[in-house]
Amino acid sequence: MTDRRDVIKAGLATLAGAPLSGAWAADKKKDDERPRSQPPLTTKPIPSTGERLAVIGVGTNNYSPTTPDERAARREVLAGLTGAGASIIDTAPGYRDSEQTIGELLAEIGNRKQAFVATKVTAPEGKLENGIAMIEESKRRLKTRVLDLVQIHSLNGVDVLFPHLDQLKKKGEIRYVGITTSSPNQHAQMLEVMLKQPLDFIQVNYSLANRDAADEILPAALEKKVAVLINVPFGGRRDGNLFSRIAGAPLPDWAAEIDARSWGQVLLKYVVSHPAVTAAIPGMTKASHLEDNLGAARGRMPDAAMRQRMEKYWDQAFGS
Ligand SMILES: NC(=O)c1ccc[n+]([C@@H]2O[C@H](COP(=O)([O-])OP(=O)(O)OC[C@H]3O[C@@H](n4cnc5c(N)ncnc54)[C@H](OP(=O)(O)O)[C@@H]3O)[C@@H](O)[C@H]2O)c1
């Protein structure tokens, strides 16, 4: 059982004098008013090895801080994530300074071993050597000899990259291989690759408001025993995302039946309770969002009947 005090201690012990940002500091003050222990994080196995991962990780397409405060906030998230026993950090060479920031912060915090670092690769100009150079650069920026997961980003380079990624896996430089998309237009192509190519992971867009992946992709992942990461579980960072559609609507009564205390937890519990889904990787740059989202990995999860109820509620309240 993870104690919340331990989580905060583990996360903050390494902040070496960095000022506490508002959210976490406020939480610390309220600590005495809260239960001493938290239920454990729900984990799920990676089908190809049985290694278990907490069902909530972090997406980092907004990890290029421009001020010390922004950097400190991201540091709190990465320290708090592994301090709580979660591990997945999803990044990409295309996310501006994200890899560099994560490499530096994990080194400062000292939690590389607790992290499951997932990055991405493409084959610029269709050339394998460009993909190889990209992976080397990712290792350098992330300050790691072994990448936990390398995913072909938005299926860009699937034809040239696979044999090489398999070799790197055999050599122990990569632990797992996967493919990603966040676009329903690529679902058919993703399915084709899944049927042809042995894969450890796929990463796909799926949410209460966008359930396309459940038609064929998620059943295929179950069938082929492929781990699934869910990106954009809140519909992204821009206006029009799921939070802006919810727009302050009260939490439905049934949320208590799945131990969800916020809309974020409702949305994430829906995603990670799909039997094919291994984990969701919501983007988060605030410790308050980390704490909220980790709550989705705790307590009761929706069963099939509750999932249907959630879908019906969403469609009636916010449109499909
Ligand atoms: N093709 C691909 O491979 C692909 C494409 C897109 C995304 N991705 C991956 O998927 C990850 C997730 O996607 P995303 O970050 O674009 O979108 P998202 O996860 O759907 O939403 C992120 C937004 O939600 C906010 N948020 C997080 N937790 C919250 C909470 N509990 N309450 C209220 N707001 C909350 C975040 O705010 P704060 O930042 O302020 O905390 C951020 O603005 C990316 O970071 C990336 O790693 C992969």
Image (cartoon, helix red, strand yellow):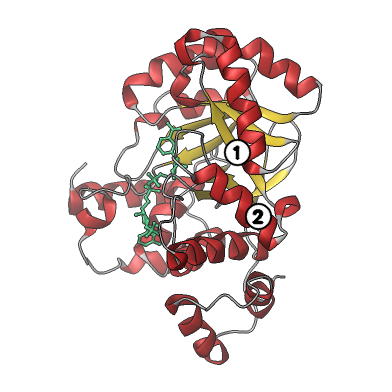
**In the rendered image of this protein, does residue 39 appear above or below residue 90?**
below
Specify the amino acid type for callout 2.
Leu
Q: Nearer the viewer, mark 2 or mark 1?
A: 2
Residue 42: x and y, percent? 62, 56
For label 2, the residue is 106
Label 1 secondary element:
strand
Q: Earlier in the sequence, mark 2 or mark 1?
A: 2
Asked if residue 262 lies left or right of residue 240, the reply is right
Quadrant location of the N terminus in the rendered image: bottom right
> Which one is in front, 277 or 63?
63
- Residue at position x 55%, y 12% in the image: 195
> Which one is in front, 259 or 11?
11
In space, the residues marked 2 and 1 are separated at their CA atoms by 13 Å
> Which one is in front, 248 or 305?
248
Q: Residues within 10 Å of mark 2 (few under 14, many from 20)?
A: many
The answer to whether residue 197 is seen in the rendering is: no
Quadrant of residue 160 within the rendered picture: top right
Quadrant location of the C terminus in the rendered image: top left
Quadrant of residue 167 within the rendered picture: top right
For label 1, the residue is 118
- Residue at position x 44%, y 24% in the image: 154
- Residue at position x 48%, y 29% in the image: 218
Specify the amino acid type for callout 1.
Ala
Rendered image: mark on residue 51: none
Residue 230: x and y, percent? 47, 40
Label 2 secondary element:
helix
Residue 124: x and y, percent? 47, 16
The answer to whether the beta carbon of the residue marked 1 is less than 8 Å from any atom of ligand 1 is: no
The answer to whether residue 314 is seen in the rendering is: yes
Residue 265: x and y, percent? 43, 61
